[in-house]
Amino acid sequence: NYGVGAWNSGTDGGAFDSFLANGLFRLTATSTNRSYRLESSTNDFVVNENVSVTTLSEPQTVTYGDIAFTVWRQDNTLQGKFMQISTGTVLAGGAQVKLNTANATGKFVVKTDSGKAAILWENGVDIYIAFRDLTAANFPAIGSEIKVATRPNTSGGLGLAMGGGGKAIAVWSTVATSTVLFTTTTYHTVYGRNFQGDVAGTSGTGFGVALISGVGMTCVLNADSDGGNTAFIAVGYGVDSNIVNGYTFDFATGTKQAGPVNLSGTTGAANVTSVAVNATAGKAFVVWRRSDTTAVARVYDLTTNAALGPNAFGIAGNTSAISINAMTGYGLLAFSSTKNTGIYLRVVDLSDGLLEYTTTLQLDTSKTATSRKPGGLYLVSGNIIALWEHQE
């Protein structure tokens, strides 16, 4: 709010029926008889160009320099668009383009490193990956899309990490069951496969990450990298318990460097329902949400392959959705609350893996909302910018 003499709670999304209904609000300084008006630096612009769309997913955006690459699923098609961040204009050759040949029917993930972008998606029981060059004119495909694996069924997690100069490691899991004497055991197998996105999208061989089994066993996964030569994979699982382990693999060879390294320490009776990972400058910020709505965090050192701090620590209870980002030495976490639909912020110091502040900051100030969902988090010159979705 630098340079603004007053602020209206409507600016965070409250009271939609009146907020900006008659245009942008003015701030009048009676002592100087001057009037100020708050305006955006650029106009809104439409990213997608849909016609007769049945299903439209939420978009995912990655950046390289001044280029923003946005990907979304439109029915069974993955669409992409390349924009210039500083101007908000479509770049030459960056108009909406179809990214896949094999249908996209489920989850998809987009990551970038060293000017290369990877798109990983599900097509029924099959998993595919494709690469784009963000440094070349018209942002061409790098090689052809590759079938990563075929699952026995459509169940399982999906993750992607990029690093090592444009290389990628795809991570996925399969689910199977076996019943003996009326007892059904669930088996989760986590796999990985490395790809040389910097060399025409060529692929390496697949490798195993973890095998987990038990009666009623659940399993979730995620992956990321700080852009170095190591991919970090987090796997959360349990049967009325919550265990999260970390693994590291070499991008070039697919060789395991470490793992499993326990991140969760002493666990309670709730399952892990989701796990988020974001890595920067040799540290991986890992946050998982349990079925009792508690969010728990831990920092992993990618150089020493060790978890920092004496143990995992609770970020907050009563969480419904979380969003994280790791940058310039800090892990940022925003979450929505099941108690009042509020949006809250917490900050973790990545150097020691401990909370930077003991307090939790509530970001929203408006009273009325049927739901809120956290979005992007950014740390710029010591200031945190937080975005969230507001519905009423």
Image: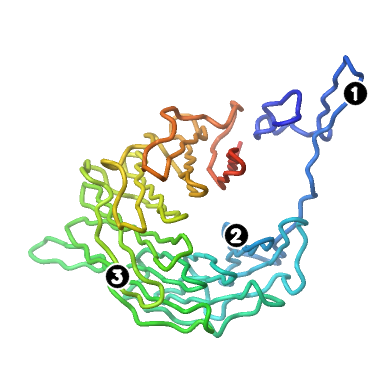
Q: Residue at 62% across / 63% down in the picture?
A: 64
Residue 34: which disc? 1
**Between disc 2 and disc 1, whose residue precedes?**
1
Which residue carries the number 2 mark? 61
- Asked if the residue under mark 1 is in contact with the one under mark 3, i.e. CB atoms within 8 Å, the reply is no
- Give, as a three-letter code, the residue at label 1: Arg
Find numbered disc 1 in the image and state the secondary structure of the residue it sits on: strand
In-image side of 96 versus 190 (left or right)? right
**Residue type of the residue flagged with mark 2:** Thr
Query: Where does residue 213 sit, x and y in percent of width and height?
Result: 19, 62
Label number found at residue 256: 3
- Mark toward the start of the polypeptide (2 vs 3): 2
* Residue 135 image position (x, y, % from top left): 65, 73
Q: Report the residue that reaches farthest toward the left.
A: 181
- Above or below 392: residue 359: above
Asked if labels 3 and 2 touch by Cβ distance under 8 angstroms, the answer is no
Q: Can you tell which quarter of the image residue 94 is in?
A: bottom right
Q: Marks 2 and 3: which is nearer the front?
A: 3
